[in-house]
Image (cartoon, rainbow, N blue to C red):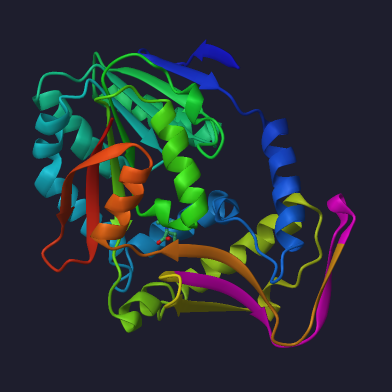
Amino acid sequence: MSTHPGTAAGVTLSVHLTPADLRSALESDVRAGLANHPPTLPPKYFYDAVGSELYEEITRLPEYYPFRRERQILQERAGEIASLTAADTLVELGSGSSEKTRLLLDALRASGHLTHYVPVDVSETALRAASEAVAGEYPGLDVHGVVADFDRHLGLLPEAGHRLVAFLGGTIGNLDPDQRHSFLTDLRSGLQPGEFFLVGCDLVKDTGRLERAYDDSAGVTARFNRNVLSVLNRELDGDIDVDTFEHVACWSAENEWIEMRLQTDKPQEWHLRALGLTTSFEAGDHIRTEISSKFRQAGMEGELMKAGYTPVAWWTDPDGDFAVSLSRAE
Ligand code: AVJ
Protein backbone atom coordinates (compact mmCIF):
# COMPACT_ATOMS: atom_id res chain seq x y z
CA MET A 1 0.00 0.00 0.00
CA SER A 2 1.18 3.52 -0.66
CA THR A 3 -0.16 6.73 0.79
CA HIS A 4 0.64 9.98 -0.87
CA PRO A 5 -0.75 13.48 -0.83
CA GLY A 6 -2.80 14.33 -3.89
CA THR A 7 -2.27 17.50 -5.85
CA ALA A 8 -5.07 19.48 -4.19
CA ALA A 9 -5.08 20.73 -0.63
CA GLY A 10 -6.87 18.44 1.79
CA VAL A 11 -6.62 15.34 -0.45
CA THR A 12 -4.79 12.11 0.40
CA LEU A 13 -4.94 8.93 -1.68
CA SER A 14 -4.19 5.42 -0.38
CA VAL A 15 -3.58 2.90 -3.12
CA HIS A 16 -4.29 -0.74 -2.25
CA LEU A 17 -4.72 -1.79 -5.86
CA THR A 18 -2.05 -1.27 -8.50
CA PRO A 19 -2.68 -1.55 -12.25
CA ALA A 20 -0.92 -4.93 -12.05
CA ASP A 21 -3.38 -6.11 -9.35
CA LEU A 22 -6.30 -4.99 -11.49
CA ARG A 23 -4.85 -6.79 -14.47
CA SER A 24 -4.44 -10.10 -12.69
CA ALA A 25 -7.94 -9.78 -11.17
CA LEU A 26 -9.37 -9.22 -14.67
CA GLU A 27 -7.55 -12.26 -16.02
CA SER A 28 -8.62 -14.59 -13.23
CA ASP A 29 -12.20 -13.23 -13.08
CA VAL A 30 -12.69 -13.73 -16.83
CA ARG A 31 -11.13 -17.19 -16.81
CA ALA A 32 -13.27 -18.29 -13.87
CA GLY A 33 -16.46 -16.72 -15.22
CA LEU A 34 -16.18 -18.23 -18.67
CA ALA A 35 -15.64 -21.68 -17.13
CA ASN A 36 -19.11 -21.51 -15.53
CA HIS A 37 -22.21 -23.08 -17.10
CA PRO A 38 -23.66 -20.88 -18.44
CA PRO A 39 -20.60 -18.61 -18.67
CA THR A 40 -20.66 -15.40 -16.60
CA LEU A 41 -18.75 -12.12 -16.56
CA PRO A 42 -18.54 -9.88 -13.46
CA PRO A 43 -20.48 -6.60 -13.85
CA LYS A 44 -17.56 -4.53 -12.58
CA TYR A 45 -15.96 -4.76 -16.04
CA PHE A 46 -18.80 -2.77 -17.62
CA TYR A 47 -17.31 0.44 -16.29
CA ASP A 48 -14.48 1.53 -18.57
CA ALA A 49 -14.70 5.14 -19.84
CA VAL A 50 -17.33 4.23 -22.47
CA GLY A 51 -19.34 2.06 -20.06
CA SER A 52 -19.31 4.70 -17.32
CA GLU A 53 -20.62 7.22 -19.84
CA LEU A 54 -23.37 4.77 -20.92
CA TYR A 55 -24.35 4.17 -17.30
CA GLU A 56 -24.71 7.94 -16.82
CA GLU A 57 -26.99 7.90 -19.85
CA ILE A 58 -29.00 5.02 -18.33
CA THR A 59 -29.64 7.09 -15.19
CA ARG A 60 -31.41 9.67 -17.36
CA LEU A 61 -33.65 7.17 -19.23
CA PRO A 62 -37.39 7.43 -18.55
CA GLU A 63 -37.58 3.67 -17.85
CA TYR A 64 -34.67 3.61 -15.39
CA TYR A 65 -36.32 4.77 -12.16
CA PRO A 66 -33.79 3.57 -9.46
CA PHE A 67 -31.37 6.48 -9.76
CA ARG A 68 -34.06 9.18 -9.46
CA ARG A 69 -35.97 7.38 -6.72
CA GLU A 70 -32.89 7.04 -4.55
CA ARG A 71 -31.98 10.69 -5.09
CA GLN A 72 -35.52 11.67 -4.09
CA ILE A 73 -35.25 9.64 -0.86
CA LEU A 74 -31.87 11.14 0.01
CA GLN A 75 -33.11 14.67 -0.68
CA GLU A 76 -35.94 14.01 1.72
CA ARG A 77 -33.97 12.15 4.41
CA ALA A 78 -30.40 13.44 4.43
CA GLY A 79 -31.10 15.60 7.49
CA GLU A 80 -32.49 12.63 9.43
CA ILE A 81 -29.53 10.51 8.35
CA ALA A 82 -27.17 13.16 9.71
CA SER A 83 -28.99 13.52 13.02
CA LEU A 84 -29.48 9.76 13.57
CA THR A 85 -25.82 8.97 12.85
CA ALA A 86 -24.03 12.11 14.07
CA ALA A 87 -21.22 10.83 11.83
CA ASP A 88 -18.04 12.86 11.37
CA THR A 89 -16.80 10.65 8.51
CA LEU A 90 -18.63 9.66 5.35
CA VAL A 91 -17.16 6.56 3.69
CA GLU A 92 -18.59 5.99 0.22
CA LEU A 93 -18.19 2.62 -1.49
CA GLY A 94 -18.08 2.87 -5.29
CA SER A 95 -17.49 6.04 -7.26
CA GLY A 96 -21.14 6.86 -6.69
CA SER A 97 -22.96 9.89 -7.92
CA SER A 98 -21.40 13.16 -6.95
CA GLU A 99 -24.88 14.61 -6.58
CA LYS A 100 -25.92 12.08 -3.93
CA THR A 101 -22.58 12.38 -2.15
CA ARG A 102 -23.14 16.12 -1.84
CA LEU A 103 -26.63 15.64 -0.38
CA LEU A 104 -25.09 13.57 2.42
CA LEU A 105 -22.04 15.82 2.89
CA ASP A 106 -24.23 18.93 3.07
CA ALA A 107 -26.47 17.39 5.72
CA LEU A 108 -23.53 16.09 7.77
CA ARG A 109 -21.82 19.46 7.55
CA ALA A 110 -25.00 21.25 8.64
CA SER A 111 -25.19 18.93 11.67
CA GLY A 112 -21.76 20.26 12.63
CA HIS A 113 -19.84 16.98 12.90
CA LEU A 114 -18.35 16.44 9.44
CA THR A 115 -14.54 16.25 9.28
CA HIS A 116 -13.64 13.45 6.80
CA TYR A 117 -14.83 12.10 3.46
CA VAL A 118 -13.46 8.72 2.35
CA PRO A 119 -14.44 7.74 -1.21
CA VAL A 120 -13.45 4.17 -2.14
CA ASP A 121 -13.13 3.09 -5.76
CA VAL A 122 -11.16 0.72 -8.00
CA SER A 123 -10.32 3.48 -10.45
CA GLU A 124 -7.50 5.77 -9.29
CA THR A 125 -8.30 8.28 -12.06
CA ALA A 126 -11.98 8.54 -11.14
CA LEU A 127 -11.14 8.67 -7.44
CA ARG A 128 -8.56 11.41 -7.81
CA ALA A 129 -10.97 13.55 -9.83
CA ALA A 130 -13.85 13.00 -7.39
CA SER A 131 -11.63 13.65 -4.35
CA GLU A 132 -10.24 16.88 -5.71
CA ALA A 133 -13.66 18.16 -6.75
CA VAL A 134 -15.11 17.52 -3.28
CA ALA A 135 -12.06 18.98 -1.51
CA GLY A 136 -12.44 22.14 -3.59
CA GLU A 137 -16.10 22.52 -2.70
CA TYR A 138 -15.82 21.70 1.01
CA PRO A 139 -12.98 23.79 2.43
CA GLY A 140 -11.61 22.29 5.61
CA LEU A 141 -12.91 18.81 4.79
CA ASP A 142 -10.23 16.13 4.94
CA VAL A 143 -10.67 13.94 1.83
CA HIS A 144 -8.97 10.56 1.99
CA GLY A 145 -9.53 8.59 -1.23
CA VAL A 146 -8.91 4.84 -1.07
CA VAL A 147 -8.14 2.92 -4.25
CA ALA A 148 -9.44 -0.53 -3.36
CA ASP A 149 -11.79 -3.27 -4.39
CA PHE A 150 -14.55 -3.35 -1.80
CA ASP A 151 -14.98 -7.05 -2.54
CA ARG A 152 -11.60 -7.63 -0.95
CA HIS A 153 -10.24 -4.63 0.92
CA LEU A 154 -12.94 -3.66 3.38
CA GLY A 155 -10.59 -4.28 6.29
CA LEU A 156 -8.32 -1.50 5.03
CA LEU A 157 -10.65 1.45 5.44
CA PRO A 158 -9.16 4.25 7.55
CA GLU A 159 -10.29 3.73 11.14
CA ALA A 160 -10.51 7.25 12.45
CA GLY A 161 -13.74 8.89 13.44
CA HIS A 162 -17.35 7.96 13.83
CA ARG A 163 -18.20 6.57 10.41
CA LEU A 164 -21.23 6.34 8.17
CA VAL A 165 -20.51 3.89 5.32
CA ALA A 166 -22.74 4.50 2.28
CA PHE A 167 -23.27 1.96 -0.50
CA LEU A 168 -25.67 3.63 -2.89
CA GLY A 169 -27.33 3.01 -6.25
CA GLY A 170 -28.65 -0.46 -5.55
CA THR A 171 -25.23 -1.92 -6.40
CA ILE A 172 -25.58 -4.38 -3.51
CA GLY A 173 -28.04 -6.09 -5.88
CA ASN A 174 -25.13 -7.15 -8.09
CA LEU A 175 -24.20 -9.64 -5.36
CA ASP A 176 -26.00 -12.95 -4.88
CA PRO A 177 -27.20 -13.86 -1.36
CA ASP A 178 -23.95 -15.64 -0.37
CA GLN A 179 -21.81 -12.81 -1.68
CA ARG A 180 -23.99 -10.31 0.17
CA HIS A 181 -23.52 -12.20 3.41
CA SER A 182 -19.72 -12.17 3.02
CA PHE A 183 -19.74 -8.52 2.01
CA LEU A 184 -21.90 -7.47 4.97
CA THR A 185 -19.92 -9.48 7.52
CA ASP A 186 -16.56 -8.29 6.14
CA LEU A 187 -17.73 -4.70 6.35
CA ARG A 188 -19.12 -5.30 9.83
CA SER A 189 -15.80 -6.66 11.07
CA GLY A 190 -14.09 -3.41 10.01
CA LEU A 191 -16.60 -1.25 11.91
CA GLN A 192 -16.82 -0.32 15.58
CA PRO A 193 -20.09 -0.89 17.42
CA GLY A 194 -22.23 2.23 16.97
CA GLU A 195 -20.98 3.07 13.48
CA PHE A 196 -23.53 3.11 10.64
CA PHE A 197 -24.23 1.53 7.25
CA LEU A 198 -26.49 3.17 4.67
CA VAL A 199 -27.50 1.04 1.69
CA GLY A 200 -29.73 1.71 -1.32
CA CYS A 201 -31.88 -1.23 -2.44
CA ASP A 202 -34.18 -1.51 -5.40
CA LEU A 203 -37.47 -3.20 -4.46
CA VAL A 204 -39.48 -6.07 -5.95
CA LYS A 205 -42.24 -4.68 -8.16
CA ASP A 206 -44.24 -5.23 -11.34
CA THR A 207 -42.20 -7.48 -13.68
CA GLY A 208 -42.94 -5.37 -16.77
CA ARG A 209 -41.50 -2.24 -15.19
CA LEU A 210 -38.45 -4.09 -13.97
CA GLU A 211 -37.73 -5.60 -17.36
CA ARG A 212 -38.22 -2.27 -19.15
CA ALA A 213 -35.80 -0.58 -16.73
CA TYR A 214 -33.14 -3.03 -17.98
CA ASP A 215 -34.20 -3.11 -21.65
CA ASP A 216 -34.98 0.49 -22.58
CA SER A 217 -36.56 1.49 -25.86
CA ALA A 218 -33.58 3.66 -26.89
CA GLY A 219 -31.25 0.65 -26.62
CA VAL A 220 -28.79 2.31 -24.22
CA THR A 221 -28.77 -0.64 -21.80
CA ALA A 222 -28.14 -2.98 -24.75
CA ARG A 223 -25.05 -0.93 -25.69
CA PHE A 224 -23.94 -0.85 -22.04
CA ASN A 225 -24.27 -4.63 -21.86
CA ARG A 226 -22.40 -5.35 -25.12
CA ASN A 227 -19.66 -2.90 -24.12
CA VAL A 228 -18.25 -5.50 -21.73
CA LEU A 229 -17.29 -7.55 -24.83
CA SER A 230 -15.42 -4.54 -26.25
CA VAL A 231 -13.57 -4.32 -22.93
CA LEU A 232 -12.51 -7.98 -23.34
CA ASN A 233 -11.42 -7.37 -26.95
CA ARG A 234 -9.25 -4.42 -25.94
CA GLU A 235 -7.85 -5.70 -22.65
CA LEU A 236 -7.40 -9.37 -23.52
CA ASP A 237 -6.64 -9.18 -27.25
CA GLY A 238 -9.97 -10.71 -28.21
CA ASP A 239 -11.67 -11.26 -31.56
CA ILE A 240 -15.28 -11.12 -30.32
CA ASP A 241 -17.82 -9.98 -32.92
CA VAL A 242 -19.63 -7.79 -30.40
CA ASP A 243 -22.71 -7.04 -32.49
CA THR A 244 -23.60 -10.71 -32.94
CA PHE A 245 -24.65 -10.82 -29.27
CA GLU A 246 -28.17 -9.82 -28.39
CA HIS A 247 -29.02 -8.00 -25.16
CA VAL A 248 -31.56 -9.87 -23.00
CA ALA A 249 -32.97 -8.76 -19.62
CA CYS A 250 -35.23 -11.20 -17.79
CA TRP A 251 -36.78 -11.41 -14.35
CA SER A 252 -36.02 -14.51 -12.30
CA ALA A 253 -39.03 -14.94 -10.01
CA GLU A 254 -37.21 -17.67 -8.11
CA ASN A 255 -34.20 -15.50 -7.24
CA GLU A 256 -35.99 -12.15 -7.34
CA TRP A 257 -33.35 -10.65 -9.57
CA ILE A 258 -33.06 -9.19 -13.04
CA GLU A 259 -30.59 -11.13 -15.09
CA MET A 260 -28.79 -9.47 -17.99
CA ARG A 261 -27.51 -11.75 -20.70
CA LEU A 262 -25.72 -11.61 -24.03
CA GLN A 263 -27.13 -14.23 -26.35
CA THR A 264 -25.98 -15.54 -29.71
CA ASP A 265 -28.47 -16.80 -32.31
CA LYS A 266 -25.79 -18.71 -34.20
CA PRO A 267 -22.95 -21.05 -33.26
CA GLN A 268 -19.67 -19.19 -32.88
CA GLU A 269 -16.25 -19.24 -31.29
CA TRP A 270 -14.11 -16.45 -29.86
CA HIS A 271 -10.51 -16.19 -28.75
CA LEU A 272 -9.03 -14.16 -25.94
CA ARG A 273 -5.42 -14.36 -27.06
CA ALA A 274 -3.98 -12.80 -23.88
CA LEU A 275 -5.46 -15.74 -21.95
CA GLY A 276 -4.87 -18.37 -24.64
CA LEU A 277 -8.57 -19.08 -24.24
CA THR A 278 -11.15 -20.19 -26.82
CA THR A 279 -14.86 -20.10 -25.96
CA SER A 280 -17.48 -21.86 -28.12
CA PHE A 281 -21.21 -21.17 -28.30
CA GLU A 282 -24.15 -23.07 -29.79
CA ALA A 283 -27.08 -21.18 -31.29
CA GLY A 284 -29.18 -19.79 -28.41
CA ASP A 285 -26.38 -19.92 -25.81
CA HIS A 286 -25.87 -16.95 -23.54
CA ILE A 287 -23.40 -15.35 -21.14
CA ARG A 288 -24.78 -13.94 -17.90
CA THR A 289 -23.31 -10.46 -17.46
CA GLU A 290 -25.16 -9.12 -14.42
CA ILE A 291 -27.66 -9.92 -11.73
CA SER A 292 -29.52 -7.00 -10.19
CA SER A 293 -31.33 -8.31 -7.12
CA LYS A 294 -34.54 -6.67 -5.95
CA PHE A 295 -35.38 -6.61 -2.25
CA ARG A 296 -38.17 -6.66 0.31
CA GLN A 297 -37.84 -4.95 3.68
CA ALA A 298 -38.03 -8.16 5.73
CA GLY A 299 -35.42 -9.89 3.57
CA MET A 300 -32.93 -7.03 3.58
CA GLU A 301 -33.28 -6.33 7.30
CA GLY A 302 -32.97 -10.06 8.01
CA GLU A 303 -29.69 -10.15 6.09
CA LEU A 304 -28.43 -7.11 7.98
CA MET A 305 -29.29 -8.64 11.36
CA LYS A 306 -27.62 -11.94 10.42
CA ALA A 307 -24.46 -9.98 9.63
CA GLY A 308 -24.36 -8.06 12.94
CA TYR A 309 -26.29 -4.86 12.27
CA THR A 310 -29.45 -3.46 13.86
CA PRO A 311 -31.87 -1.86 11.40
CA VAL A 312 -32.51 1.77 12.39
CA ALA A 313 -34.58 3.17 9.50
CA TRP A 314 -36.13 2.11 6.21
CA TRP A 315 -37.15 4.90 3.88
CA THR A 316 -38.89 4.52 0.51
CA ASP A 317 -40.10 6.93 -2.13
CA PRO A 318 -43.90 7.54 -2.13
CA ASP A 319 -44.44 4.86 -4.81
CA GLY A 320 -42.45 2.25 -2.90
CA ASP A 321 -40.06 1.66 -5.80
CA PHE A 322 -36.75 1.97 -3.97
CA ALA A 323 -35.53 1.92 -0.37
CA VAL A 324 -32.68 3.40 1.59
CA SER A 325 -31.86 1.40 4.70
CA LEU A 326 -29.88 2.69 7.69
CA SER A 327 -28.47 0.23 10.20
CA ARG A 328 -26.04 0.32 13.12
CA ALA A 329 -23.13 -2.03 13.68
CA GLU A 330 -23.64 -3.93 16.96
C1 AVJ B 1 -25.19 0.41 -10.99
C2 AVJ B 1 -25.53 -1.86 -10.35
C3 AVJ B 1 -27.05 -0.19 -9.60
O1 AVJ B 1 -28.13 -2.85 -11.31
O2 AVJ B 1 -29.42 -1.17 -11.77
C4 AVJ B 1 -28.14 -0.43 -14.90
C5 AVJ B 1 -26.37 -1.22 -13.18
N1 AVJ B 1 -27.31 -2.39 -15.18
N2 AVJ B 1 -28.71 -0.99 -15.99
C6 AVJ B 1 -28.31 -1.67 -11.67
C7 AVJ B 1 -27.26 -1.34 -14.38
C8 AVJ B 1 -28.18 -2.16 -16.15
C9 AVJ B 1 -27.09 -0.77 -11.95
N3 AVJ B 1 -26.22 -0.62 -10.74
Q: Is residue 237 above or below residue 286?
A: above
Residue at left offset 22%, top offset 20% = 88
Magenta span includes 263: yes
Which span of residues is magenta-colored? 258-277
**Residue extending farthest front:** 306
Instruction: Decide if residue 97 is in sight here.
Output: no
> Residue 71, position in %: x, y?
22, 52
Please give the name of the residue rendered at 77% of the width and 54% of the height, measured from the top-left corner: 31
Quarter of the figure with the N terminus: top right
Left or right, 277 with respect to 306, comes to right
User: Within the image, what quadrant is residue 68 found in?
Assistant: bottom left
Residue 215 vertical position relative to residue 12 in the rendered view, above or below: below
Picture residue at 15% right of the left edge, 18% below the top: 113
Q: Is residue 27 visible?
A: yes
Query: x, y (%) of residue 90?
Result: 29, 28
Residue 60 falls in which quadrant of the image?
A: bottom left
**Residue 128, image x and y in percent?**
47, 28
Q: How many marks?
A: 0
Q: Nearer the viewer, residue 326 or 44?
A: 326
- Asked whether 6 falls inside the magenta stretch, the response is no
Most prominent secondary structure in the magenta stretch?
strand
Q: Image quadrant of ligand 1?
A: bottom left
Q: Is residue 90 left or right of residue 53?
A: left
Residue 114 x %, y %: 20, 20
- Locate the C terminus and report the quarter of the image it occupies: top left
Horizontal side, residue 118 vs residue 289: left or right: left
Residue in view at x 23 percent, y 56 percent: 323
